[in-house]
Image: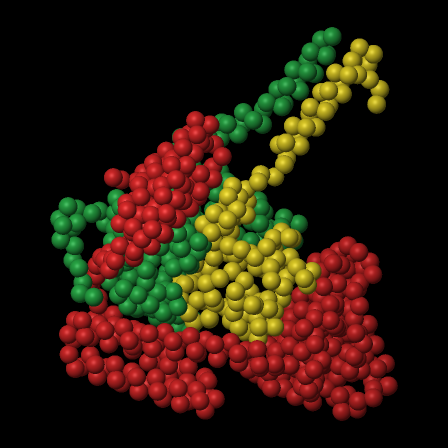
Chain colours: A red, B yellow, C green
Amino acid sequence: MSESVIRSSALLSSARHHRLVPALLAALLASGCASTTDARQDQSATAAPVTETAAVTPDAEPASQSSATRSKGGPVGSSSLRSSPLESASLGASLLAILEETNDPVTPPEKAGNGAAHLAFIARLIEESSAAQQVSDSSNPAAHLRRNEARAYYRSAVAASEAGDAERADELGKKATKMMFMAVRLAEADEVIEVKHERDYRRRLESVNALLDAHERVGAEDELGTSFSQTREVIRQQVARAETLHQQDQLDQARERLDAAYVALKLSIQAAREGQTRIRSLDFATKEEEYQHELTRNDTHQKLVGLFMQDSDTSEGMKRMIDNFLGKARELRQQAENQADDGNHEAAVDSLNESTGQLVRALRTVGIFIPG
Amino acid sequence: MSVPKWVNPKALHAGLLASVMCAALVMLPGSKAWAEYGDVVINNYSEDSDMRPVVFPHWFHRIRFRCKVCHGDLGFEFQAGGNDINMLKIIDGEYCGACHNGNIAWGVENCELCHSGKPGLETHVHGSTLKSLVTPGNQGQ
Amino acid sequence: MMFRIASVTLAAVMLVMPLSISAQSKDPLSFNRLMADPETRNAPPLKDGIHDPDNPATDRLQSPREAFSALPDANAGNYVDWVEALQDGLINPRYDLQDPDMSPTVMDLDIVREVKGSMPDVVFPHKEHTEWLDCANCHPAIFIPQRGANPLSMAAILMGEQCGACHGRVAFPVTQCRSCHSRSKTPADEAATQKEAQ
């Protein structure tokens, strides 16, 4: 008999948890490894040993079970004979953990090399991270059990690392990480996710309201008649219903309804505006407004000169020309600002125009083609 | 090292020094990083937890998903580091974890595939115009 | 004596070599200063300066060059024309999280924005944007869907606001002037610009 079987039968005689003995026997006969089944989120502690057994696990995951069988090297009875010492050690380690429900924390590996640094990280993940905290705070025993499994895998990984098998250590380390993540999922802290879902809902609601306003404007502008407005009313009602559900804390249904309204709205606007062109002309109510616009235009050109001049291969002569233009542009801008302060916005606009013109010359010198 | 009598030690030293210098020059890493445009380096919490910063490759995802899927359906903001992503959220299936769960894409127990950035990088979008303007001469590094 | 000359000459040659090599790597397109050298662009993760080569998994990450070899070229950004790649069917990225077969709601609506000065007017095409994005991605968080409500400034765009939320970060950068400034002002246009009633 292989090592794991001998060890387990020794344990049998000293098993403190008699209810686990039949499960343990079944586990011994199984070749599957628990990690390959997806976590059954609602499993309780008493059901947890069931996940260890290939035979008893619900057939929801037959595919992964059979792949587990393949990965562990064959059908039931023979696996423990054919499997490598390390594999048996990991299987035995899992069972050991379950049996003794060991809560012993793990520590970083002592020997360096062979992936020890990453293993140290995994040890921290299992014991000290915010994930670990979440599991510790959890009242779900399945979460704690999963963490013990993670610990068991981790110990096997350290053993592999010390034996010099870096690849195996990495594989077991990944299993440990995966187990720990499953533990975190079982430990279910909803608050963080709820906050995000709430925020996502509010954003979507904002978009829907903005687009409803746009819908109204489109209807008025293009004179699209009553059926268009009626569509809008129906959509508004759907949104109102979504909001009611939201008030009742039924966020998932509320979001679903809101999304349906959103899609209908999108399609309605699309049908109305498809194939059109709209022109936004520059109209300034006052010279002052135009001055403000010219200021940002001047800023833009300044930034563009900076952006296009990054290549340090500009020759000395070119640099001097550009500095010349920049200097003139600066002067003209100052002149414009002074004129604006004096209230003469018309002159200020003209000065700014000239200033920007100097910047355009600088840009052309750098090699950017600007027409005009 | 035994040197023949006819070798002038000064010339030898000069030659060795010159060789070392140009070897150093040639081997010095360039000041520009040629990473892909749009790669997002995220280092809000990674380095504090002794992990390498995350490098998110937009190009790889753009081939497979339209912008809407992540920025609309999954709720990602248009801002590097602006989503306050941490592993707990990912493990719970939000953000990256919505796909990187072993089903749609590889699972997050593969730490090094995401946490693959050079230590010390700050959160930024590589190659962005903003970065180029703010730190001229360093193409968004 | 001979050895002295030889070693000094060798040292001089070795000093000059790196400088001359970098001069030779200038290709004829060096006029376009911001265009990256074809040798260095789309570098594989091990060499790109951002990924840590000491990380064990870095060599498993795909090289962009490999993925882009089948895609149409562009002059900036990823050096890939993503819009053309999509329209030509070379890529077919998923549109919806839940439904893999959903087709996008594309709206063909052009917004022409007049600009001051001699640069051509900007045309914003909803079509190319709605092929990738959802209405809610931009409206109203970045742009209010209302005429007159969005004063645009290129300075802001360069600093990452407005269009710069994407253009200059992930979508083609604003060094591609003609991609947006695409509608020339004709004398007829300037004389009788279609002024929309405010």
Q: Is residue C67 above or below residue A99?
A: above
Q: Is residue C60 above or below residue A158?
A: above
Residue B101: where, in percent of width, then height?
55, 70
* Residue at the farthest top position: C1
Quadrant of the frame with the N terminus of chain A: bottom right
Residue A73: where, in percent of width, then height?
67, 68
Visible in this render: residue C67? Answer: no
Residue A50: where, in percent of width, then height?
67, 85
Quadrant of the frame with the C terminus of chain A: top left
The residue depicted at 57 percent of the width and 81 percent of the height is A191
The residue depicted at 47 percent of the width and 47 percent of the height is B133
Q: Is residue B89 left or right of residue C75?
A: right
Q: Nearer the viewer, residue B130 or A166?
A: B130
Residue C124: where, in percent of width, then height?
28, 57
Q: Is residue B8 left or right of residue C158?
A: right
Visible in this render: residue A337? Answer: yes
Q: Is residue C111 left or right of residue A94?
A: left
For residue B50, what is the image quadrant? bottom right
* Residue at the farthest front position: A342
